[in-house]
Image: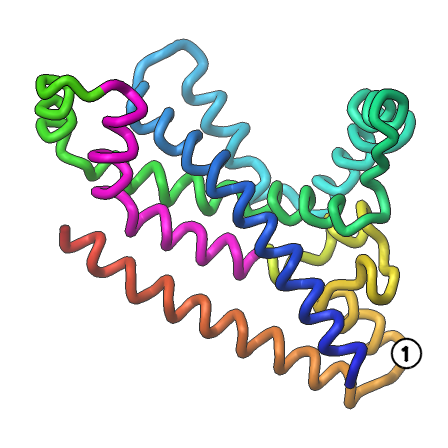
Amino acid sequence: MDAAWIALALSLKVAGWATAVNLVLGTAAGYGLARWRRFPGRELLDALLTLPMVLPPTVLGYYLLVLLGRRGPIGQWLDTHLGIQLIFTWQGAVIAAALVSFPLVMKSARAGFEGVDRQLEQAGRVLGLGPWALFFRVSLPLAWRGVLAGLLLAFARALGEFGATLMVAGSIPGQTQTLSIAIFEAVQAGQDGSASLLVGLTSLTCVAVLLAAGRLQPSRSAA
């Protein structure tokens, strides 16, 4: 029982940090694609940013291992200059979960910003608002439903992430063993009771998040 709650707490921690990362990166990418609609390579950039949504999680995990491992370009630099190792840590699990769930935030935020009336933004410029003030005082308040819906979906996706997280962070009880990994380990060990409890916790949490996201979508579409 204690192991189940520890796995739930770790999963919430990883999903929360991954969602926070995507709040910044996903919203920025969605805003950029919504506003700068014509530039060379836009379609390729959009495809690359959406790629984590369709690639198998194990492929993403392999890419992360190549980049963040001790011999990888990023991992080697972090280890040499900062003494930071991301493989087999909960921080590595955050990176894996953030990468897998990033397109959900980016796509939803992009749709939200594309639905903002450009005349309102133009009026803000006429009133003397700079780029940052225009974004935080006009664009984001009008697109917040789309951004929040994407964040809720990304949180649910990060909470259930398995393949990339297992490859990057491993399965260390109490340190990197998230709910989905704990379910896999319980099934492999024949612990049906523990597996059922973990499945129930995961399902209830994800259903609650999806219900919250679903309540936002109709309002945003009607607007």
- Image coordinates for residue 1, horizontal then vertical, percent: 78, 85
Which residue is more in the foreground, 6 or 95? 6
Q: Which region of the structure is painted magenta?
A: 130-157
Q: Is residue 140 magenta?
A: yes
Residue 203 located left or right of residue 144:
right
Q: Is residue 103 above or below residue 187?
A: above
- The residue that disc 1 covers is 189
Residue 74 located left or right of residue 150:
right
Q: Main secondary structure of the magenta part?
A: helix
Which residue: 51% across, 36% down?
50
User: To which quarter of the image does residue 158 belong?
Assistant: bottom right
Which residue: 14% across, 55% down?
222
Q: Amino acid at mark 1?
A: Ala
Residue 202 located left or right of residue 156:
right
Q: Is residue 118 above or below residue 12?
A: above
Which residue is more in the foreground, 182 or 122? 122
- Determine the secondary structure under disc 1: loop
User: To which quarter of the image does residue 76 belong?
Assistant: top right
- Image coordinates for residue 118, horizontal then vertical, percent: 14, 28
Q: Is residue 82 above or below residue 210?
A: above
Packing grade of label 1 (10 A; few <14, some 14-19, many >=20) is few
Which residue: 82% across, 26% down?
78
